[in-house]
Image: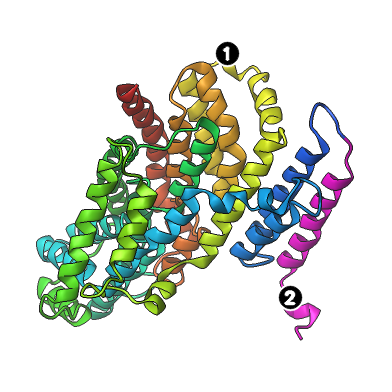
Amino acid sequence: MAKFDDVSAKRVIGLVLGVVLVAVAGLAPDSWGLTREGMLALGLLGGAVVFWVCDVLPMGVTGLLATVLLFPLGAVDTFAQAFSGFTTLNVWFILAVFSMTAIMSRSTLGLRLARRLIDLSGSDSRRLVLAFMGVSAIVSTVMTDAGAAVVTMSIAIAVLNSLGAERGSSNLGRCLLLGITFAAFIGGFATPVSHALNVVGSGIYQQATGQAVSFVEWAAVGVPMALLMVPITWFFLVRAFPPEPIDAAVVGRAVDDAISIGEWSLVDTKALAFVVAMPVAWVASSFTTVLDPTIVTIIGLACMFLPFVDLLDWRYFAGCVNWNVFLMLGGIMCLGNAIQSTGAAAFFSGLFMGSGILDLSPFVVMLVVAFAVYALQTVLPVAPAFLTLLLPLLIPYAQAVGISPLIPVLVMCSLLAGNFLLPLNPNSVVTYSEGYYSFFDMFRGGWKAAVVHVVLVVTVSFAVTALFA
């Protein structure tokens, strides 16, 4: 049994604060038009946010616990209503889409892409950084951001070791590890299926508007953002830390040692077929009601297990699923349903609308909110909580002022996918732990790109959604 001294003070403080929030919400009377049930739903969400920030419990367990408590505490009338979030298509979509991560891990497609781009970079260390960023961004469109970063980083570290690049002093090391991190965040926004946050945002959008997010409309913002932000981020990064020259022959040998690809295999052929077919089906779902992205993805997942296909087996697939994300997403959707049904969302929406914000330009409002959210998530990396709290307010605002309600979803999902300023996001911790860059290095290399990112995603979202109106 762990002694008190062995337990993180942060977790103990989080436990106490989370319980107090729920208790205060449960004891508070109806006030200002907010029902007791609404207070309880908000209290449970607040408690869950504190638990997530302080790592009191695993993220998925916190989501389940908050969901279970909705009924006994009286926020909803039945357990079925409490767990209604787990019946939404978005939750099962995120489970099925982990199949793409699984087949990328099972095949050599990502490694072959990396080898090809590294060959094209030659002996130019700046182009080498851009090549690695390109690999990270592309792979993260069909794989989790952390998975894309790990795959790309493993090759980058082999190259750095062969070159004798020292941790903490090599600019090439700084550029490669930071670039891989930033590019994974950027690629994760490219399509509505590239990141778990995109699925969360899509689910909240569908709850609020009754409409599904179009794959094409999202990609029309996400893909140009990726094409613009990768080179922009690279430009600022190599100017902040000019990478030292490299020997092409040494890099070539390092890559050969790191990437043992071998001959093209039947597994690669099968994986390539799915990597091509699934996005085609997702795009097609935007133009017909017969296809639905979730149904397409689940059918695709099932096909990967079929006889004569046998691309996946259950044990391997289960190992590739981030069950924390799956359970946390379900919990967020359940809490979101409760906040909607108890009138809490409508209450805060009314306060937001009555604050005078409608007098400002919608573009200015979104820009101010975007910068504020980016600053907050830099030190509080709880992106799902921010989405759950903010989108129920911003979507009705967008509808009230006559802009696309998809704009706040796109902006928030893009900015909350990762951070260019501090390595507090779980995905950036993966590369930070290697020791090639410091906290200040990340800020120095990423702050200009962060400013451009905020302005660009707001501008592109307004411009593209206007074309679909």
Other residues around mark 1 within 10 Å, as few (<14) / some (14–19) / many (≥20): few
The residue that disc 1 covers is: 359
Q: Is residue 19 magenta?
A: yes
Q: Which span of residues is magenta-colored?
A: 1-29
Q: Quadrant of the C terminus?
A: top left
Q: Amino acid at mark 2?
A: Val
User: In the image, residue 194 lies at what x, y percent?
Assistant: 36, 52
Q: Which label is found at residue 455?
A: none
Residue under label 2: 7
Secondary element at image label 2 = loop
Locate the N terminus and report the quarter of the image it occupies: bottom right
Q: Mark 1 or 2 closer to N-term?
A: 2
| Residue 307, magenta (yes or no) | no
Measured as percent of width and height from the top left, residue 267 is found at: 19, 74
Q: Nearer the viewer, residue 173 or 53?
A: 53
Does 116 sit left or right of 303 as displayed? Answer: left
Amino acid at pointer 1: Asp
